[in-house]
Amino acid sequence: MPELKDRPELDAAAARDWIDRWDRQQEVYMPDREDRFTALIDAVEASAGRPDPLILDLGCGPGSLAVRLLARLPGATVVGVDADPVTLALGRAAHADLPGLRFVSIDLRAAGWVARLGLPAGCPVDAVVSTTALHWLSAAELSDLYATLAGVLRPGGVFLDGDHFRQDQASSPVLARLDRVLEEREAQRRYPDGHAGRAEDWDQWWQSVAADPALAEAVAERERGHVHHGSEGSQLATHTAALRAAGFAEVGTLWQRGSSRVLCGVR
């Protein structure tokens, strides 16, 4: 690894290029990603009832959802929360001058993480959002997280999670199988010969990032931190049960395409 003084700095233009590549590789797995973003943001706007809502973006990555929220709601305050030093470095460099957006490095599994957000005293959160992130948490971790969110959101505030939520194989084996089949067939139609050579995928993106000297320190920190961890968190029933147990008044799917959903909990 080059000495710190010899490393190039990550500038805004380079960070935006990396984020553009991030968005494209995410679409390899989620061709409906922008539609899901739009539906989630529609729900935030319709439920907030004000032009300047306070929003938490959990597992925010480089800020892909956050910047789209602020494009729609420029008066909002969005606090992006993540534990990945690489995507946080990209988001901070690319969006340093974007009013209303702040990134915080936090592990959502850590006790008392809300106190580290620096939220205004007496100002409850209007919406908590997440996309393609919380499936890394275990069932127990999701239960703890949703109990915490129930105490952070204002009455009537919403939690919105866009992700692939799987049917339970034990209780709904046919639905679970059909979910997989439809997803596989859509991928085959999109990339009949495979995506190799046609689109950058997850592994290729991370390999390229690791070769960028400007991101060497963040990559090394990521490798030390074991940012991603295995889970039961892809199961729809796990999330809905945990939200109801946490006291959310209503829980259901607002938007869906196959297993890709926007799951909503109303406080």
Image: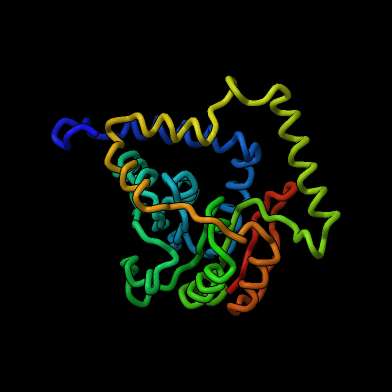
* Any part of residue 60 in sight: yes
Locate residue 250 relative to residue 53 in the image: left or right.
right
Q: Residue furthest right?
A: 174
Q: Within the image, what quadrant is residue 234 found in?
A: bottom right
Q: How many marks?
A: 0
Q: Nearer the viewer, residue 117 or 171?
A: 171
Q: Quadrant of the C terminus?
A: bottom right
Q: Nearer the viewer, residue 117 or 179?
A: 179
Q: Quadrant of the N terminus?
A: top left
Image coloring type: rainbow
Instruction: Tell me residue 35's x, y (percent).
Output: 63, 43
Locate residue 168 relative to residue 147 in the image: left or right.
right
Q: Residue furthest top?
A: 197
Please tell me which residue is depicted at 41% across the width and 29% down the height of the picture.
208
Q: Within the image, what quadrant is residue 19 found in?
A: top left
* Any part of residue 45 in sight: no
Instruction: Tell me residue 156's x, y (percent).
Output: 57, 73
Instruction: Tell me residue 132's x, y (percent).
Output: 56, 50
Please tell me which residue is depicted at 51% across the width and 73% down the height of the picture.
144
> Looking at the image, is 100 positioned above or below residue 183?
below
Please tell me which residue is depicted at 63% across the width and 63% down the height of the picture.
264
> Looking at the image, is 223 positioned above or below residue 28?
below
Instruction: Tell me residue 76's x, y (percent).
Output: 42, 57
Please tell me which residue is depicted at 31% across the width and 67% down the height of the picture.
118
